[in-house]
Image (spheres, rainbow, N blue to C red):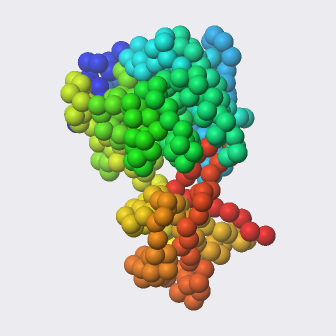
């Protein structure tokens, strides 16, 4: 199974793919890129088209400058957690009406806390607001708050008997960890919506104490594709059901790519790769049709002194360490060269994490670290911190961060 739709199901939507192809053919930087490929009239012909990467899409959008037929054209940022911003476009409503046709986690009697950051060009807050608007529920548009504000706001939310909250898993962990530490419970909370990062299993521990009735409801997508699919509490956290206006394809290397079949889509999404690997199969929830299981990012390799460091593999190792709840790789650069690599760890309360022995193990077992820092191993450090490096605007906490030192 390599496509989320059958030939028959995708037939009408391929007209959108053909129109998108014509737009991409008109981008000067793509001269000759699609010359050998016919306009796709089948899924096989679609799969033969060259995939788009993030830089390709940014090049196309710079030339096309799309505009919505109705309402405003919103410009959003993608990739601002660890890299240069990329632009994505969306019309007013952010395509959520099509999502709402198939996925309705919010109901009219819900009190929903929108905790996605609302600042600048981050899109998830407004996307969630669009979903809440369609649901007709009550909304508390909270956005980002500071550490000192958590106790007061948590008390406010408990008094308002909130039934739903949404945010990136990094942000949600802050909310529930602060509630647990302060002894604040949210007994009315039944739904936790999430988008923007993989679900973090450690959230379950805090939810069990703070909001034992709460269940997760996830969305998968990007600022380029917008929401591709969703899951329910009965689905595994890494498995999503694609919507019929989003065509998911798994290539021979196991990488996911996405093609929009929505005529209103402004971004020219045609075999667009987010960098995620995945597979299509049946979901344990029993819902018919193929589901998309996301296996993790394949582009999460960073260059350290000319060698590739596999961040996911490194983090998988440190997060198996007793007492460690999450890790992050922080690379400090000076003049474009990695000067220091720090593995930052969040630890469970009272945990005694063996940072020095873990550092020695990582140095000896990780080829990139042992080779790149053969002459200055002291510049590889492992330390426990109170908070990982996060994007203050979006609230996202990436697996790695790069810091420039003067």
Task: Say if residue 13 shows up in the picture.
Answer: no
Residue 219 percent location from the top left of the image:
44, 31
Q: Residue furthest bottom?
A: 375
Tell how many labels: 0
**189 left or right of 46?**
right
Q: Is residue 210 above or below residue 388?
A: above
Q: Nearer the viewer, residue 131 or 17?
A: 131
Q: Residue at x 30, y 33 (%)?
A: 235
Which quadrant holds residue 44? Answer: top left
**Residue 238 in sight:** yes
Residue 397 percent location from the top left of the image: 57, 50
Query: What quarter of the picture does the N terminus occupy?
Result: top left
Residue appearing at x 72%, y 35% in the figure:
120
For this rendering, which residue is in front, 10 or 386? Answer: 386
Quarter of the image that includes the C terminus: bottom right
Relative to residue 55, is residue 243 depicted above or below? above
At a point 45% along the width and 45% down the height, the residue shown is 206
Residue at image coords 54%, 35%: 167
């Amino acid at each position: 199974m390599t496509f989320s739709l059958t030939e028959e199901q995708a037939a009408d939507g391929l007209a959108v793919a053909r129109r998108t192809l014509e737009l991409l053919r008109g981008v000067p930087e793509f001269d000759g890129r699609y010359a050998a490929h016919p306009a796709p009239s089948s899924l096989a012909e679609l799969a033969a088209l060259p995939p788009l990467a993030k830089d390709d899409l940014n090049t196309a959008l710079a030339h096309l400058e799309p505009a919505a037929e109705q309402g405003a054209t919103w410009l959003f940022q993608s990739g601002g957690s660890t890299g240069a911003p990329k632009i994505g476009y969306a019309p007013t409503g952010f395509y959520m009406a099509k999502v709402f046709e198939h996925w309705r986690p919010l109901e009219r009697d819900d009190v929903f806390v929108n905790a996605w950051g609302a600042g600048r060009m981050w899109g998830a807050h407004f996307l969630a607001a669009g979903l809440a608007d369609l649901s007709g529920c009550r909304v508390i548009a909270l956005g980002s708050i500071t550490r000192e504000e958590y106790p007061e706001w948590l008390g406010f939310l408990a008094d308002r008997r909130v039934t739903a909250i949404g945010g990136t898993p990094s942000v949600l962990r802050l909310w529930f960890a602060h509630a647990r530490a302060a002894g604040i419970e949210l007994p009315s909370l039944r739904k936790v919506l999430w988008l923007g990062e993989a679900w973090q299993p450690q959230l379950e521990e805090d939810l069990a104490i703070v909001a034992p009735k709460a269940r997760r409801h996830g969305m998968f997508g990007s600022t380029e594709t917008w929401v591709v699919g969703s899951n329910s509490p009965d689905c595994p956290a890494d498995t999503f059901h694609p919507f019929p206006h989003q065509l998911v394809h798994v290539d021979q290397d196991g990488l996911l790519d996405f093609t929009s079949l929505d005529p209103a889509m402004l971004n020219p999404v045609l075999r667009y790769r987010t960098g995620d690997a995945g597979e299509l199969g049946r979901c344990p929830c029993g819902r018919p049709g193929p589901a998309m299981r996301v296996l993790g990012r394949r582009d999460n390799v960073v260059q350290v002194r000319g060698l590739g460091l596999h961040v996911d593999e490194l983090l998988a190792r440190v997060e198996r360490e007793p007492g460690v709840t999450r890790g992050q790789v922080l690379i400090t650069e000076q003049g474009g060269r990695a000067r220091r690599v720090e593995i930052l760890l969040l630890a469970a309360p009272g945990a005694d994490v063996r940072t020095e022995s873990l550092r020695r193990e990582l140095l000896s077992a990780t080829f990139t670290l042992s080779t790149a820092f053969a002459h200055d191993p002291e510049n590889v450090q492992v330390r426990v911190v109170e908070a990982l490096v996060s994007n203050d605007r979006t609230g996202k906490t990436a697996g790695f961060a790069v810091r420039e030192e003067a």
